[in-house]
Amino acid sequence: MPLPSAETGYFFIASALLLFVLGAYTLLFSAFLPPSGIRILDIMITDVHYKSFALLIIPTTSYFVIANWVGWQYFMNS
């Protein structure tokens, strides 16, 4: 199996940074800054109940996918 290319690594790094900046803006900095003018960001900022859900679903899903994969590997190799 060939190793992933450098572009794949750069994609994951850029995606993680984008998620971090988006989360920091919507959860922390939006209280101190005026509305951005971007419709999606303004909807996330004004939402009080599900503001964190959109950002926390990604790491939570990743955790469960990795945990299930590791459990499957233990099962297959036992």
Image (cartoon, helix red, strand yellow):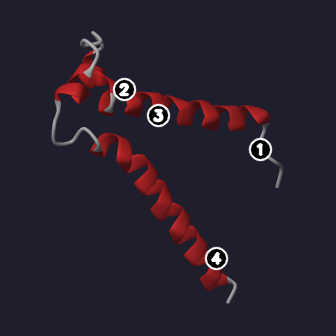
Q: Which mark is residue 4?
A: 1
Secondary-structure class at tag 3: helix
State the CA–CA distance, disc 2 to disc 1: 31 Å
Q: Is residue 20 above or below residue 57?
A: above
Secondary-structure class at tag 4: helix
State the CA–CA distance, disc 4 to disc 2: 38 Å
Q: Residue at x 58, y 76 (%)?
A: 72
Q: Which mark is residue 19?
A: 3
The three-letter amino acid code for the residue at tag 1 is Pro
Give the foreground label among 2 and 3: 2
Q: Are marks 2 and 3 in contact (CB under 8 Å)?
A: no
Q: Are marks 3 and 1 in contact (CB under 8 Å)?
A: no
Q: Residue at x 51, y 70 (%)?
A: 68
Q: Residue at x 28, y 45 (%)?
A: 53
Q: Which mark is residue 73?
A: 4
Counting residues from the start of the chain, the first of labels 3 and 1 encountered is 1
Counting residues from the start of the chain, the first of labels 1 and 4 encountered is 1
**Disc 1 crowd, CA 10 A, few/some/many (<14, 14-19, 20+):** few
Give the foreground label among 2 and 1: 2
Q: Position of residue 19 (x, y in %)?
A: 46, 34
The three-letter amino acid code for the residue at tag 4 is Gln
